[in-house]
Image (cartoon, grey):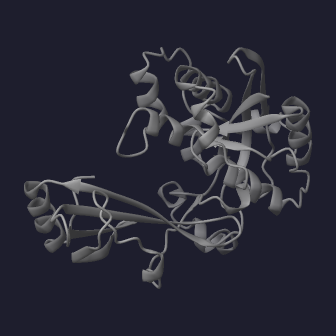
Amino acid sequence: MNYVIIDLEFNNMREIDKYYPDYYNEHPEYENIKCPNEIIEIGAVKLDRTMKQMDTFKVYIKPEIFSFLNPRITEITGIETKDLDEGTNFYNAMEMFINFVGQDVIIGSWAKDDIVELIRNADYYNYKNLDWLKEYIDIQEYCTKVLAQKKPISLKNALDRFYIRIKKDLHDALNDAVYTAEVFKRIYNDRIVKSYIIRDIKNMPSIEIRDYSNFKLDESKIDESCPKCSSHIYMEYPLKLFGWRFIGLGSCEKCSSKVLQKIVVKQTLAGDKVYVENKRLISEREYLDYIYQIENNRIVNE
């Protein structure tokens, strides 16, 4: 069993109005496009089970969805139009990548976004050969849990944490794949990693919900048990939307523990909504601090 660590770079029209204020007036077809993040670069590293690097892969993809490269993308990645002009089309790039991947592999990436967008791009281009994408590991999630972080750790912070020297620029697909592989080597444990491998990619909670204007939490999906004694929590401040997550405060009816509850709602590639819950015990002082923040409609301790 080998691991292939993948990283993608995209072209999209995010913040395009900073460069072209009338862009959406001139191109209204791009405002709600089916595939908003077009893959323009694939980078990957192949590791064997002993974490020895076996090979690397890099390819540029000529864009077809968007007519030009967003200047913001060039500023972030350093990719220029001339690089893409020398690239290949999506179909050929995928065939080259699959040949690199080979058989009996687990795909890994820093967060699930790249895998989601790869599947979206494949769907847009009607590319059906995704049988190789059977097992997957979110290395960011794995690293966050191993390091006992409260929120997802960035790749840059993980590199700093493990004293991995950054010799080449980030936001290059191959460079980021190499750095992700280096972090993975530091935290790899053959026994522990098995519990993080996802075998049902279609139904993994992976897509962030950005529009909550007509969204209502399904109370039947919410676990209101105490993380300390499993008794019922009385929600003194019911779950309320703050940005991208719902936050509530309650007290355990049995042990009187103060509980902070957070829920992030994600969507699977199959379209189902999944509630990702996080509950923790907090002190009386933290509880009062959160009450102040909630009543003033601002959450700062995140």
Q: Is residue 218 visible?
A: no
User: Which residue is drawn at the image coordinates 48% and 14% (left, top)?
Assistant: 165
- Residue 126, given in percent of the width and then of the height, sits at 89, 61
The N terminus lies in which quarter of the figure? Answer: top right
User: Which residue is drawn at the image coordinates 91% and 33% (left, top)?
Assistant: 99
User: Which residue is drawn at the image coordinates 28% and 60% (left, top)?
Assistant: 229
Locate residue 63 relative to residue 228 in the image: left or right: right
User: Can you say whether 172 is above or below 63 in the image?
Assistant: above
- Residue 223, given in percent of the width and then of the height, sits at 40, 70
Q: Nearer the viewer, residue 132 or 299?
A: 132
Locate residue 279 relative to residue 255 in the image: left or right: right
Quarter-of-image position of residue 86: top right
- Residue 76, given in percent of the width and then of the height, sits at 53, 38
Q: Nearer the viewer, residue 123 or 169?
A: 123
User: Can you say whether 124 is above or below 77 in the image?
Assistant: below
Q: Which of 165 and 52 is in front in this view?
A: 52
User: Which residue is drawn at the image coordinates 70% and 43% (left, top)?
Assistant: 136
Quarter-of-image position of residue 286: bottom left
